[in-house]
Image (tube, rainbow, N blue to C red):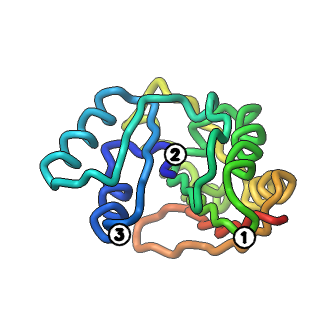
Amino acid sequence: LDIGCGFGLFSLYYAATGPRRLVRGLDLSASRVAQARRAAARLGLDNVAYEVGDARDFKGDGEVSAAYMLDIVHHVPATSVPPLLRALRRCLPAGGRLLVKDVDTRPAPKRWFTWLLDRAMAPAAPVHYWSAEALTQALTEAGFGVHRHLMVDLLPYPHVLYVCQARP
């Protein structure tokens, strides 16, 4: 399950490299979902499905073996993140994986650089960066064991990867 799939870059990769894998992408942007569907058709992939939807409305309907959200949490209103994380936990079996990559609040210069990019790319989108500690706590409270990894890049992004496992 790809929450915030955009134009399908990662979901298309996972579908192409795992023909027996069914990948579902969800994104708020109808134009991005249309791009992802066209790309899947051009690539001849029938094991990926895209739908327009708001992450805030995700209810955890059905079971998935894994899910991921890449650079999405900071665009979801802060009050909607805990319910989303709980819904994701409900749709994962015990031991199922959730990967979350998002922006940390520290160091501040990197956060400001990322904020400028977010404003340039989506001026109207809400932005709320979580500290690594606060997002780890929210994931833990939603029912995940969390391993946090700082992502070091040449570019000045304060990104963190959260590798989460659904607790029984």
Whichever of callouts 3 and 1 sits on the residue coming sooner in the sequence is 3
Q: Quadrant of residue 54?
A: top right
The reply to whether discs 2 and 3 touch (Cβ–Cβ < 8 Å) is no
In this image, 112 relative to 19: left or right? right
Q: Nearer the viewer, mark 2 or mark 3?
A: 3
Whichever of callouts 2 and 3 sits on the residue coming sooner in the sequence is 2
SS for callout 2: strand
Q: CA distance from mark 3 to mark 1?
A: 20 Å
Q: Given the image, on which type of amino acid does mark 3 rest?
A: Gly
Q: CA distance from mark 2 to mark 1?
A: 19 Å
Question: In the rendered image of this protein, does residue 46 appear above or below residue 145?
Answer: above
Which residue is label 3 attached to?
Answer: 18
Q: Quadrant of residue 80?
A: top right
Question: In the rendered image of this protein, does residue 104 appear above or below residue 62?
Answer: below
Q: Given the image, on which type of amino acid does mark 2 rest?
A: Ile
Which residue is label 2 attached to?
Answer: 3
Which residue is at the front of the view, 33 or 154? Answer: 33
- Give the number of the disc on residue 95: 1
Q: Quadrant of the C terminus?
A: bottom right
